[in-house]
Amino acid sequence: MGYSDFIYGKSRHNERDGFAPAWMPDFLFDFQRYMVEWAVNQGRAAMFEDCGLGKTAQQLVWAHNVVLKTNRPVMLATPIAVGAQTLRESEKFGVPAKRTRDGAMTDEACVWVTNYEQLHKYDPSRFAGFVGDESSAIKDFKSERKSVVTEFTRNIPYRLLCTATAAPNDFWELGTSSEVLGRLGFRDMITTFFKQETSKDGRGWGRTKYRFRGHAEHPFWSWVCSWARSIQKP
C-alpha cells in the first residue's frame, strides 16, 4: 500500500454503505439512471438537482430499491404541499407508495409518504430507508425541523436527500445535510475544515464568520463530492 492509498483509507471519502440496485426502470433518462445508481451504491447520499430534472422519479426508484433489498418500508418526508404530488408520481411510475399523516401505518413494505411536520409521530426503527424531499427545508442547523429529522434518521441505514434549491456556497446547508446523512456532524465539519474569523473590533457582532483553513479548501470539496452530486442540466 502506497502512502497516498493509506491517507485515502483514513479519510472519510470511502464511506460507502449501499448496494447494487436491483431495479432500474426504462423511464429514467441516462443522467437519472447514473444518479440513482450512484446514490443506491452510496447508501447515504444527497442529490442536488435543478428544477425539472425529475428528482421525484429518481427518489422513488431509489426508495423502491431499498424496499426490494430489505423487504422493509421507506419513509419519504416532504413539505406539506408536496405529498399529494409525490403520490401521483408514484402511481405514474408504478412505485408502490402510500400516504400517512397521523402516525398510523401498516407493516407493508413500500414507500410511505408523510410531511416533515408529522415525522415525530413515527417509530424510525420500522424503516430501512429515509428520503428527505426538498431537503433545503432542514438547512438551518438551529431549527426544530432539522433536529427532528436528524434524530429520526440516526439509526436508519439508507438515507437520501434531494433538493433543487441547495445554495452551492452555503456551508451551513452542506453541514446540516452531512449530519442528517450520518457523515460529519455540522460542528465536526466546521472544526475540521474552517477557522473562525475574528472581527476587527474584537466584539464579534453579527453572524459568526468562518474561512477555510489554509490546507482545507480542496479536501473540503473532495469530501462533499464523496456523498453529494449537483447538476443544473443533463
Image (cartoon, rainbow, N blue to C red):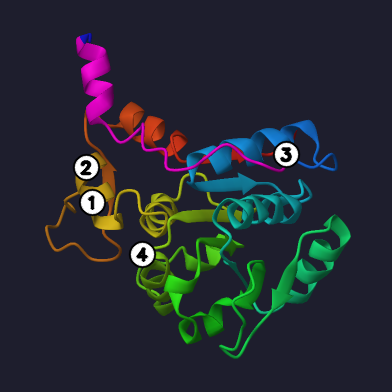
Label 1 – label 2 distance at C-alpha:
6 Å
Which amino acid type is marked by label 3? Gln
Which amino acid type is marked by label 1? Asp
Q: As drawn, is 102 to the left or to the right of 145?
A: right
Which amino acid type is marked by label 2? Thr
Near-viewer residue (5 or 163): 5
Residue lying farthest top?
2
Where, by quadrant of the figure, is residue 147 drawn? bottom left
Q: Which residue carries the number 1 mark?
A: 188
* Residue 132 spot, x, y in % from top left: 56, 63
Classed neighbour count for the residue bearing mark 1: other residues with Cα under 10 Å, few (<14), some (14–19), many (≥20): few
- Up/down of 182 relative to 222, above or below: below
| Discs 2/4, front | 4
| Discs 2/3, front | 3
Q: The residue tagged with tag 2: helix, strand or loop?
A: helix
Classed neighbour count for the residue bearing mark 2: other residues with Cα under 10 Å, few (<14), some (14–19), many (≥20): few
Q: The residue tagged with tag 4: helix, strand or loop?
A: loop
Q: Are marks 1 and 2 in contact (CB under 8 Å)?
A: yes
Nearest to N terminus: mark 2 or mark 4: 4
Which amino acid type is marked by label 4? Arg
Label 1 – label 4 distance at C-alpha:
16 Å
**Residue drawn at x 45%, y 79% as measured from the top left:** 123
Asked whether 164 falls inside the magenta stretch, the response is no
Label 2 – label 3 distance at C-alpha:
33 Å
